[in-house]
Image: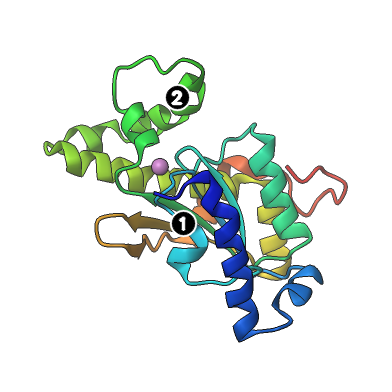
């Protein structure tokens, strides 16, 4: 394990390593960002967005919280998604969950987690929506893994529900939304291949905010 003192030494090494391949690396970074991807993932220390995607600084806009949630009234994720679409014009929005997620695990247990309870309740809601399917899985680990996948799918819905996403997609043809799971045991990224267009159509039946009718409506 790295000690606190070692971090700044490692940072110096990282800077010199980067400069070996590209002398102007940091000067170029300072000029601005133009990422094509917004990644929404879990805060879990084992799930390192850029490293597992093999991307460089500047390539992915990142938002992380416990269990990769996109909560309807969380202005942190709302702001990130709105900024990524409106100003960065990202082409892809990825919600990435991971097997063996502590947040998902906690939401499956009858345990009082104090101040974290309301956050985890959103995952319990996902369990409730899919109770029949989940309760039919007898193997506990398999049920846990399935809830991770269903939670990713539900958070994709929460992204697509947003007016800013619907408006921008219908006008420009992007961004598209993807659901991934990182399998910690193998290191592999799994694309859940969610049907974005079908989800968008389903969403509009209930969450259509009169898009296209009023250009002054708020983007939330
Ligand atoms: Co997690």
Q: Position of residue 60 (x, y in %)?
A: 60, 64
Can residue 38 be spotted in the picture? no
Count of numbered marks: 2
Secondary structure at badge 1 equals loop
Q: Which residue is mark 1?
A: 48
Secondary structure at badge 2 equals helix
Mark 2 Cα within 10 Å, few/some/many (few <14, many 20+)?
A: some
Q: Contact, CB < 8 Å: mark 2 with mark 1?
A: no
Mark 1 CB lies closer than 8 A to ligand 1: no
Which residue sits at x=57%, y=59%?
9
Q: Position of residue 173 (x, y in %)?
A: 66, 70
Q: Earlier in the sequence, mark 2 or mark 1?
A: 1
Q: Quadrant of residue 35?
A: bottom right
Q: CA distance from mark 2 to mark 1?
A: 25 Å
Mark 1 Cα within 10 Å, few/some/many (few <14, many 20+)?
A: few
Quarter of the image that includes the C terminus: top right
Quadrant of the image where one finds ligand 1: top left
Q: Is residue 140 positioned above or below 23 on the image? A: above
Which residue sits at x=31%, y=48%?
99
């Amino acid at each position: 394990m790295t000690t606190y003192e070692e971090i700044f030494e490692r940072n110096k090494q990282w800077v010199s390593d980067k400069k070996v391949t590209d002398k102007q690396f940091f000067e170029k970074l300072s000029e601005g960002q133009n990422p094509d991807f917004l990644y929404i993932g879990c805060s879990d220390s084992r799930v390192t967005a850029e490293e597992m995607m093999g991307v460089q600084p500047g390539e992915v806009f990142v938002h992380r919280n416990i269990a990769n949630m996109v909560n309807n009234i969380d202005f942190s994720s709302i702001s990130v998604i709105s900024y990524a679409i409106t100003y960065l014009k990202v082409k892809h929005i990825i919600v990435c969950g991971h097997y063996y997620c502590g947040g998902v695990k906690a939401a499956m247990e009858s345990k009082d987690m104090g101040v974290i309870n309301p956050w985890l309740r959103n995952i319990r809601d996902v369990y409730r929506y899919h109770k029949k399917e989940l309760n039919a899985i007898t193997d506990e680990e398999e049920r846990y893994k399935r809830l991770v996948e269903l939670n990713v799918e539900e958070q994709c819905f929460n992204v697509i529900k947003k007016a800013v996403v619907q408006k921008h997609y219908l006008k420009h043809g992007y961004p598209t939304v993807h659901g991934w799971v990182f399998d910690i045991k193998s290191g592999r990224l799994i694309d859940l291949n969610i049907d974005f267009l079908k989800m968008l159509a389903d969403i509009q039946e209930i969450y259509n905010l009169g898009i296209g009718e009023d250009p002054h409506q708020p983007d939330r």
